[in-house]
Amino acid sequence: MIVSDKIRKNILPTFDPENIWFTSDTHFCHESIIKFCSRPFANAGEMNEELIRSWNETVPNDGIVFHLGDFCMGNTSDWNNIMNHLHGKIILILGNHDMKNIKQGFMQRFELVTQQMTIRVGGQAIILNHNPFLCYGGSYRDVWHLFGHVHSGPRSQTGLDIPRLRMLFPLQYDVGVDNNNYRPVSFAEVKAKIDAQIEAAREAFGMKNVRGTGGNCRIVFLDPSIAPTSTAQKAAFKRLEDVASDIVEISTGKGQSLKEAIGKRVALLYGNVRYVYMGTQPLEEFRYVPVDKNAGITECNVDSAISILKRV
């Protein structure tokens, strides 16, 4: 198998964006999942038929599907029936149910079976795993993370893990069937979802002037207590505005540290982006220009900030 050979040679597998799909948590033949996730099916047989129909309407015969776990329950006959009717080559990322339900001899029917995988689709690096991560390598460098397990979606909001999803990066997405109209999603669809999540997060954080990334993207995170008031301060601040792509005021919520407040916004910046924090609180973890609260913004502060923003 080509994918297996690349992994053994430590080569990051690369796939065509036009011929790749993602899904998770089909739970074929699992009667109880219907009630648990409020799926619109009368029984497991009807669910199987609809999931297979939706899959085959979406995926061509030569398509590649990454299934991120919890594929099927049932006996060997059930597995044969499901596997014989699905389009495409399937790469299975094992889920918690797969560990005890995958049938002997069926490992060979998948293109690859693994616990976790990192791939590249076009120029996009993607980590694939059954469970969502709170942190992962590349989360600050435009690496996506696709997952399943949590059964999020418009009809399914009862899972114990649903509240935790608010803690994830906007570069992460649940590709499970409950969250995607009971069918696999294409790379283009996932990209549109993640782009929308990034834009929504940027707007929520007051980063409205940041659109995409690039070498000229320069962000100033500003302590609102040092906003310019005098003529001299405003003149110095104008120099900063001329250099920065965006100036974002940072305020901390109840129980939130300054590091966390800035960190959530830095997670939205990737590629060749420069940023600096200007404020009265010490902040060693990020690029920081200290400002005396009484003196406020000065030409010297601005010189230091511009030097950081323009540094290659």
Image: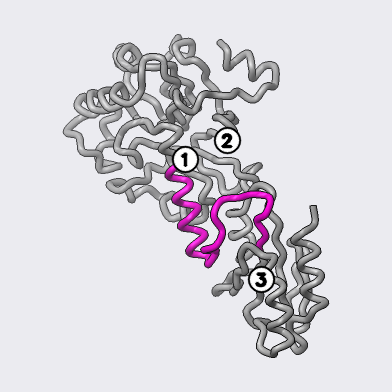
Q: From this viewpoint, is residue 97 visible?
A: no
Task: Give the percent coordinates (x, y) of residue 161.
Answer: 44, 49
Q: Residues within 10 Å of mark 1 (few under 14, many from 20)?
A: some
- Indicate the secondary structure of the residue bearing disc 3: helix
What's the amino acid at mark 1?
Lys
Q: Which residue is mark 1?
A: 191
As shown in the figure, which amino acid type bears the numbered disc 2?
Answer: Gln
Q: Which residue is mark 3?
A: 241
For badge 3, the amino acid type reads Glu
Q: Position of residue 89 (x, y in %)?
A: 44, 16
- Determine whether, in the image, residue 125 is placed left or right of residue 282: left
Q: Is residue 168 visible?
A: yes
Q: Nearer the viewer, residue 2 or 298?
A: 298
- Mark-to-mark CA distance, 2 and 3: 32 Å
Decide: is 120 above or below 262.
Answer: above
Let me know if residue 197 is in the magenta part.
Answer: yes
Colour scheme employed for the rendering of this structure: one colour
Counting residues from the start of the chain, the first of labels 2 and 3 encountered is 2
- The residue sitting at 41% across, 15% down in the picture is 62
* Image: 299 above or below 242: below
Counting from the top left corner in percent of width and height, residue 86 is at: 33, 17
Q: Are marks 2 and 1 in contact (CB under 8 Å)?
A: yes
Tag 1, which secondary structure? Answer: helix
Q: Which mark is residue 124?
A: 2
